[in-house]
Amino acid sequence: MVKLAEKMMQKRENIRNIGIVAHIDHGKTTMTDNLIAAAGLMSDELAGKQLFMDFYELEQQRGITINAANISLVHKFKDKEYLINVIDTPGHIDFGGEVIRAMRAVDGVVVVVDSVEGVMPQTETVIRQALREKVKPSLFINKVDRIVNELQLTEEQMQERFIKTITQVNKLIKTNAPKEYVEKWQVKVNDGSVSFGSAYYNWALNIHTMKETGISFKDVYQYCKNQDQKTLAKKSPLHVAILGMVIEHLPNPIQAQKYRIEAIWTGDLESEAGKAMVSSDEKGPFSMMVTDVTVDPHAGDIATGRIYSGTIRSGMKVKLLTGQKEVGVQQVVVFMGPERITVSEVPCGNIAGLVGVREIWAGETISSSDMKPFESFKSTAEPVMTVSVEPKQTKDLPKLIEVIRQITKEDPNIVASLNQETGEHLISGMGELHLEVTQYRIEKDHKIAIDVSPPIVVYRETITKGCETLEGKSPNKHNKFKMRVEPIPKEQLEKLVEAKLDKKVKPKDKEMIAKFEEMGFDRETSRRIWAVHNNNLFVDFTRGIVALYEIREMVIQAFQDAMNEGPLAKEKCMGIKVILEDSKLHEDAIHRGPAQVLPAVTRTIYACMLSSNPVLLEPKQTLFITVPEDYMGAVSKELGQRRTQITEMKQEGDASIFIAKAPVKELIGFSASIRGATQGRAIWTAEYSGYEQLPREMQDNVVAEVRKRKGLDPKPKSAQFFLE
């Protein structure tokens, strides 16, 4: 198998890099089992039951995918052999970061949709994520037997249901695909880019396999009705239909890199590195984007990613462009689910693992030349829930620090920080389940007993109006700063969040000025922006102050400090434009050092914010709850107790579907409550939907609560306090 895979890696026109994406429980991992069995890596009897790619213990216990898992398969199609690199991704919203990272490594996806549930919220999210990265979709409508045996629909109604699902998917493609691919990437039954089947019962078909086997929808209906899906699996095995669809409809790396590179890399396409990536040149300079990092107790860091140009060999010296250092590659590996297989070299167009590359993070660009790093992963979701973690035994503290560092490396969606005042380790994640999984990893995988606080919600601070210019002084009274703040308009803020910028802006940086203008800022403001931090801007509107450029770095640092901990409750700020109008600086540099500049700027920003009607923003999630009609009242009551705004209710068969927006704080413990209220019959998922203003009547109480938790006075200081 290894020799064959190594040989196949060289033929890039016969390679397909694909992701399996779907809503939770729509059958991704079950389908992947079938593909693995077809490649001879597990028995046919176990396919669909073993869940080979869910090899992590907790995934088996909970019956969900938590980590994206890679496997390379060889498949024969029309007398040619193809290498298919598959990434099986999670469907739960808390692990959406895994899907986003996987999209960078693949060129096409198989979107799996449950024939009964249809296109669900997470299906929409993963399709959007794929199209944003210029990844081409194909469609597999799964669990077809449920339509016949559970819903008892007729053959005509079954086909109507298929048409409805295909139309919904195409509508999403139309709205989100790059303009030039809106028509080309529509999924259609008559060209074979849509397949139907049951991953659990190991069968599937599409227009091509139907012609070859002579099986029609009428036959499918009869086989399902007669409970004879084994015969169907023998006549039309799932892997034949799915892998045939993948090979015929999804692009190889040579085709895909021609149009994908410009979407994921903003460097010069005419440079040596640019040309090598666009043409997928195995002899060009080596370039790779790291999409995943795992830490092996024996081998150290293993960086997995997509190679876009050149060839990697063990022993090679390469550069980490963001980390700015040179490292040696000890081993090059390919993944077979839980197994790592060592190979001598891997050329571009493949997904590979590099062993022994120390101090590396997901999102890093590895290269043999000085090229521009790849664009960061495109996601606007943020960690919204935090727990504090302490070891039960003090002697475990150094080990805990190391383990938390390792976990943040493996899962960039976990954000860890140390509360300097209390000495607690704070871990923030995408939701309750995400934090539970992280706790499990610390206690069970790394054997550290810990005390964990109840989950707390992460708020944001912002302002609702502008303020007059205020003047702040440095502690020695020799330096003065005149500043004001104003809210960033909603449309511009949305674009700023989407752009994921967090950086100091060099003077006269034409590329950045153009980006700000595209977002809707006027030319003068765009030219004068010094820094972007936490979706806030610092703008310098002073004129002719020579010494200001000498303290520029300190001013930016003070702005970042203020935006990291706002004056209301020491939460991060967002959506604020800080404008420096004027300043008077002491002519002697010794009197305008960090001890003078940092507090002066930070405190003046605080005074400005407190004069601009500051408010707290709370994170919200959109809930999608499907429940039998009899339990509608129980669900409505449960939602009513949690400050939830029901935006839509609809009926599908005997099920009611609620779509509602809920504050994350109110969703703590929701899972257990909704299970109890509906006797376990509710199926629900959530989707991150950004920050919204906390209701006025709750502002003071929540601010006091957060401040007390952080060991501060319950009441925030006044603007005047920061100007004195």
Image (tube, rainbow, N blue to C red):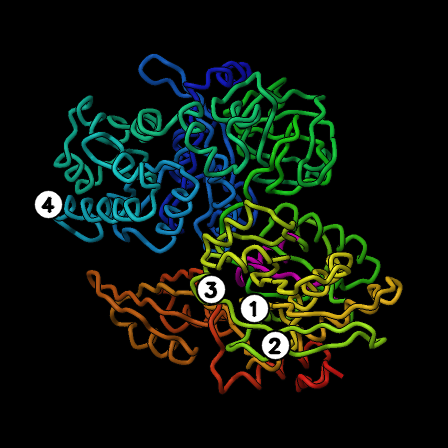
Q: Earlier in the sequence, mark 1 or mark 2?
A: 1
**In 3D space, how far apart are the residues under numbered discs 1 and 4 (Cα atoms)?**
56 Å
Q: Is residue 304 above or below residue 647?
A: above
Image marks 4 and 2: residues in contact by CB distance under 8 Å: no
| Image point (30%, 77%), residue name | 633
**In 3D space, how far apart are the residues under numbered discs 3 and 1 (Cα atoms)?**
16 Å
Q: Which residue is mark 1?
A: 576
**Which span is picked out in magenta?**
424-441
Q: Which residue is mark 4?
A: 156
Q: Is residue 319 left or right of residue 550?
A: left
**What is the secondary structure assignment of the residue under circle 3?**
strand
| Image point (58%, 59%), residue name | 429
Q: Is residue 231 visible?
A: no
Name the kind of residue labelled 4 in the image. Answer: Glu
Q: Is residue 677 left or right of residue 326?
A: left
The 10 Å Cα crowd at callout 2, few under 14, some 14 to 19, many 20 or more, is many
Q: Earlier in the sequence, mark 1 or mark 4?
A: 4
**In 3D space, how far apart are the residues under numbered discs 4 and 2 (Cα atoms)?**
63 Å
Q: Is residue 345 above or below residue 111?
A: above
Q: Is residue 218 above or below residue 113?
A: above
**What is the secondary structure assignment of the residue under circle 4?**
helix
Residue 524 marker: none
**In 3D space, how far apart are the residues under numbered discs 3 and 2 (Cα atoms)?**
22 Å
